[in-house]
Amino acid sequence: MPPTPIQYRQAERSDVSHMARIWGLEKGEGGTSEERMAAYFDSQLHPQLALPPRIIYVACEGDALIGYIAGHLTLRFGCDGELQWLYVILERRRCGVASGLIPCLAAWFKQQSAARVCVNVARTNTAAIHLYAKHGAAPIKWAGWCGTISPWPRKHEVDSVAATRQFSTGAERNNRTGVESLRVF
């Protein structure tokens, strides 16, 4: 039997409990409690320097939610948008699910005229750092990754070094949070 195709769609309010449940099994990066996710979805929770417009997309395999990505407009790190959460269940990592979610969010950022998008990544999360770099991200001086959205070039399409040269090549450790600042997409 062929594998069930992965469907990507905008999240509905009813997805929030499933998002929190799959994140809660591991409680790693890329999520938070159901209460905080619901408040974010309802525009009641505003991360640092976030602006109200926000979006969440989910990845589903059949009826099972296997991943999600969330982002919002922001003033943080001199960027226009911020990737808030990206999470894929352990069993489906390194299978292209995250790489399928990223263009969904990138298209939304492009519709919002958000040309520079950032994300905070723990310095120890090398898998996430490699994923973001694969999608055109580069370190920034502040504390995250950033890049341009046109629509997040892949390495095989453009020289990622040239595509991100406009951003700072340095990265500083935020000693208070232990998060490395990198400018992403």
Image (tube, rainbow, N blue to C red):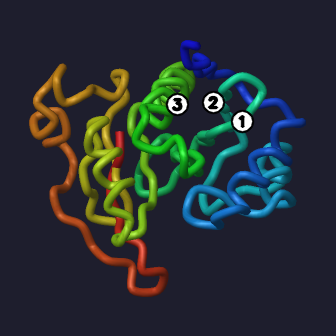
Residue on which disc 1 sits: 65
Residue 140 or residue 30, whichever sits in front = 30
For badge 3, the amino acid type reads Leu
Q: CA distance from mark 2 to mark 1?
A: 6 Å
* Cβ atoms at labels 2 and 3 below 8 Å apart: yes
Q: CA distance from mark 2 to mark 3?
A: 7 Å
Residue on which disc 3 sits: 101
For badge 2, the amino acid type reads Ala
Q: Earlier in the sequence, mark 3 or mark 1?
A: 1
* Cβ atoms at labels 3 and 1 below 8 Å apart: no
Q: Is 88 above or below relative to 13?
A: below
Could you tell me which secondary element the residue under label 2 belongs to? Answer: strand
From the image, state whether disc 2 or disc 3 is nearer to you: 2
**Residue positioned 63% across, 64% down in the render:** 26
Q: Where does the C terminus fall, quadrant-wise?
A: top left
Q: Is residue 98 left or right of residue 73?
A: left
**Residue positioned 34% across, 28% down in the render:** 152
* Cβ atoms at labels 2 and 1 below 8 Å apart: yes
Q: Is 103 above or below relative to 138?
A: above
Give the residue at the far top of this rendering.
Answer: 2
Q: Is 155 above or below relative to 121?
A: above
Q: Earlier in the sequence, mark 2 or mark 3?
A: 2
**Residue positioned 83% across, 57% down in the render:** 34
**Residue positioned 49% across, 56% down in the render:** 76
Residue on which disc 2 sits: 59
Q: Earlier in the sequence, mark 2 or mark 1?
A: 2
